[in-house]
Amino acid sequence: MNSKTNESMSLAKPNAQDISTKKKVALGIGFTGLFILVLALANVNLPNNGIFLALSLGLIIAGVVIYARDEYLTKLEGIKNDEAWFKSISSRGTWGWVLGVVLTLFYIVLYFFAELLGLGTDGEPNTGLIALFDPLSQLLSGRNASQWFVYGTLYTVAIVAFGYKFMLKYRHNRYQQLRTASVMFFQMAFAFLIPEFMYRLNSDVPYNDIKNMWPLNYYAFDQWRVDQFINSGTIGMAFLIFGILSIFVISPFLTYKYGKRWYCSWVCGCGGLAETAGDPFRHLSSKKMSAWKLERWLIHTVLVFSVVMTTAVIYTYLGYDAEKYWFNKDNFLIFVGGFLTLVFVVIMVFKRHELGKDARYGAIGYALVIVSLIAMHYTGTTNEVFYLPASGMRSAYGFYIGSIFSGVIGTGFYPILGNRAWCRFGCPMAAVLGFQQRMFSKFRITTNGGQCISCGNCSNSCEMGIDVRAYAQKGENIVRSSCVGCGVCSAVCPRGVLKLENGSLEGRINPTDVLLGNDVDLMKLMNADK
Amino acid sequence: MKHIVIIGNGIAGVTAARHIRKLSDNKITIISAETDHFFSRTALMYVYMGHMKYEHTKPYEDYFWKKNRIDLKRAYIKQVLTENKTLVTSEGEKMAYDSLIIATGSKPNKFGWPGQDLKGVQGLYSYQDLEKLEANAPDKETCNRAVIVGGGLIGIEMAEMLRSRNIPVTFLVREDSFWNGVLPAGESGLINKHILDHHIDLRLGTNLKEIISDENGRAKAVVIAETGEELPCNVVGLTAGVSPNIDFLKESGIELGRGVKVNRFLETNIKDVYAIGDCAEQHEPIGMRRPIEAVWYTGRMMGETLAQTICGNRIEYKPGHWFNSAKFLDIEYQTYGWVFSERSKSEQEVHFHWMHPEEDKCITVAYEKDSKLFLGINTFGIRMRHENFDKWLTEKRNVDYVIKHLPEANFDPEFYKQFENQILAAYNNQLQTV
């Protein structure tokens, strides 16, 4: 029975319906799997780690699969968002907060107190949860597990299991299915299996997920990594060169052709988790103008920080003397400064009119980096820049951005801030690709003439917090740097208004005052100057 | 600076206000008895279903109105005194205007059924209706069965809403096939089947005789006219169309028919009083349009047009080619140009119909028998591009051209299976057999 007495319950919250018996069983199975992990964490002595790990992961996956099949296959194909704002877990209710706190604590322990998970230090064997994963790690790479192996395995399991659920949810939509299959594949192969196998083949090559490029991968150019790549022969050099090509050639080209979605919602691991396990929380992202303003300041600040930090790190380990090796400290700074100046000038010359007021913010960012480069030249030594140790800056970035922002807040706060808080507010990679997408991509979301009814399903389901409706109801295409091209706005639109497309750059941005379907003279009159 | 008062904060009134602000510095006041802010009426169903919250149905954030100097007033206008250009609210408060725009929308039809005013009997149009439904049918324990009377767009939406909470629904439709006054038979049949697939008890060719009250004045059952069958239920949804919400204008001297009578400039018989949206009734229908068009898009277009007239550029309301769309449970529907049902089409209108053998997808293309001039298209389960059809209608293309170029107009998401080749093959096939 509904226990509410308030008459205007549409504003309050109706009770969600009870779930079916089959779903309860599925939850039981899944939580049994999780319970085994908890037992291991509590150092309960399990008779056989290999069997219990298989059992645990198997039960978790089975639970999700059974639940998803009962949830979606018992109904006709179509949009399945009933009760999203009623269910406690997906509407910032009690269960949502509980999950948020549990995830947050998990990330804090993972990043800062790995010994609590049973990580063996100083050559001691692993215990607890991490020891549970030793047999799998041995099988794949021939070494014992670390906290990162545990995390990587659970992460992959989450993407695969909830990816399956997402594919059932959108079984009428091939775009959603293909893109989900893609993130599942890239996580399983590139982030999880291949690096482990690589270690087996050549243990000198550092862990390298080749799709995880700088600046998302902020440690890509740390000295130890670059040294290891250089020292491990052709394969290492190939990885290093591929990493650089990814940043300057491959990703701008693909973003030009398809928009940043090729990465953010088809390849990226953070995106992969957000689109699968994070999908039930997508509507929680704030669509307010104020959130958009915060987003633009925050994400670009992180980008500037990331560029300066990486430059400083590389700067400190390069040599002084151009005689010994041409690529020395000063040439490197000149290269970075020159490259950024080139980008800045080209944008200002060709895209000035599109940027409007934003040009000023771009100029501020550019100026900040250039000033930092000059300061670096005058204050830099082999381990210091700005009279601070470069390693300090690197660890500050790693701590605040790499761990706290992307992990603890980015994923831990899924049930509170939505599933893309990191991608939206913090990811420097998303900022770079977004900049490319906004400036020179063929990608846009086309709106269909005058068909919009301003219902708001599109904005509601936008995980990046874009107010899609604000564009659709003006008949204006959506060309936004933050759009990751997940395509859910298009899927949920009840009137067939939105379509993700790659088309010509001409007329990509097309605001109108009077929409298609009205008097043609009036449309001409009102839309003349646009 | 004139004071322009708009009664009604729906899409028509709000569009007029926005455009008047773009074009002028006039003082603008929007009055509504329904809600403080503009919301999308078409999205109310999603609030009940839990897809969205009420706040998400507002197309503009609350700061928008102040920023654009559009005053909002929550009041019910009881009287319009046109001689001295004054409005009187139900509280007796008076407000002067220089120009008045009536944009009060619709109210659900009631056809004098016995018991139509009982508790638990309601339409679904306003915010208050949504609140009522939340109180009347919060879950299947409180509402063991709901009966919906009237087979139109709101009826099927209401059925979808109630089913989202697993409430059993009986759907009484007067016609012998769903919405067949508008849809051709094949399409109407497709929707009949889809309604049944959703476990909705669809009763075609069935009329309501009366609604029976319990001892507390609440509906407890309906009686079906044809069979005399008594169906126990807790909620009765009246969705047999809507009519203009203009009762408050009876004494005003403004000419009324079913709606507020307006000319092509959206002017009433009284100077400086205009009407737009659902509540406006054209003296003469425009083209094949109905004199009253209760559609989101036409409300918006009237608002766009009237703003010009009010701001000194007097222009006629000249809507372009007809278009519309809807969603029947899981099946999306779009229409461009005119496709009439068998019941209302002319001799000269011929249909080409294609239906997918298994999936819920079909199209109907209407054209003129002799000239083969393309008249319009209905699509179900396939999205089409408005721009292409608008252009082809303007260019007066023939049906061969349209069917051949159909792939250009496809608006389905990427990687969707496309059926245009099958459609073309079916079309060629059909021609050979004729």
Image (cartoon, grey):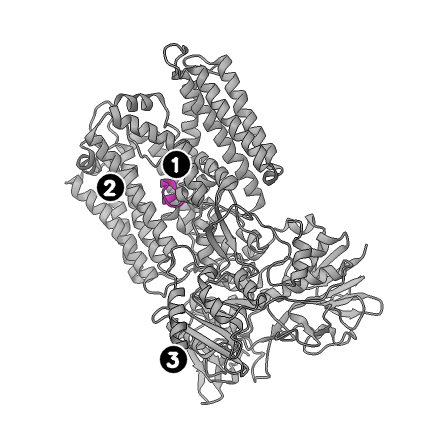
What x and y, as percent, mark residue B284? Answer: 69, 77
Q: Earlier in the sequence, mark 1 or mark 2?
A: 2
What x and y, as percent, mark residue B203? Answer: 44, 81
Q: Which mark is residue A116?
A: none
- Disc 3 is placed on an element classified as helix
Tell me if I can see residue A122 in this picture. Answer: yes
Taking depth in this image into account, of B90 and A331 the one nearest to the observer is A331
- Asked whether, in this view, residue B231 is left or right of residue A140, the answer is right
Q: Which residues are magenta?
A: A265-273
Q: Which residue is mark 2?
A: A39
Q: Amino acid at mark 3?
A: Thr
Residue at screen point 49% across, 83% down: B175
- Disc 1 is placed on an element classified as helix
What x and y, as percent, mark residue A397? Answer: 43, 27
What x and y, as percent, mark residue B239? Answer: 54, 75
Q: Which residue is mark 3?
A: B433
Residue at screen point 34% across, 55% down: A167
Q: Crowding at label 1, few (<14), some or many (≥20) Cα neighbours within 10 Å?
A: some
Q: Residues at badges 1 and 2 in contact (C-beta under 8 Å)? A: no
Quarter the N terminus of chain B occupies: bottom right
- Asked whether, in this view, residue B38 is left or right of residue B201, the answer is right
Q: Is residue B56 above or below residue A201?
A: below
